[in-house]
Amino acid sequence: MTTSEKIAAIQAKMGTEPISQLTAYDYPTARMLDEAGIDMILVGDSLGMTMLGYPDTTHVTLAHMLHHVEAVARAAKKAVVVADMPINTYNTPEQALETARAL
């Protein structure tokens, strides 16, 4: 299923049935969520605290996010993957677009 098809499926639900989103940071969790029918899977910068042991999200780099987004995306056959942009990767509109394209 393409990303456009995934988004269209979520849009078709809007206003008629609940839309679900949960967080995953790795392949096995994302696979279980996808198989359970979750509509969207968030890869949040909270992975800094939950997976990497940092005291807050400010230590999370774009490289960290890409690593985890790639793992989640490999598992998500039906769900749309949504990712946070880590701090200082969206300071200008141009940088924000570059980060979005990378993710």
Image (cartoon, rainbow, N blue to C red):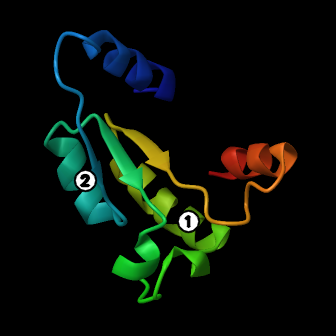
Residue drawn at (57%, 73%), measured in percent from left and top?
Answer: 64
The residue under label 1 is: 65
Which picture quadrant has residue 51? bottom left
As drawn, 17 above or below 37: above
The residue under label 2 is: 31
As drawn, 81 above or below 67: above
As drawn, 8 above or below 93: above
Query: Looking at the image, is mark 2 or mark 1 earlier in the sequence?
Result: 2
Instruction: Name the residue type under label 2.
Output: Arg
As drawn, 35 above or below 31: above
Looking at the rendered image, the quarter that the N terminus falls into is: top left
**Relative to 7, 16 lies left or right:** left
- Indicate which label's residue lies in the foreground, 2 or 1: 1
**Relative to 63, 98 lies left or right:** right
Instruction: Name the residue type under label 1.
Output: Met
Residue 51 seen from this side? no
Q: How many marks?
A: 2
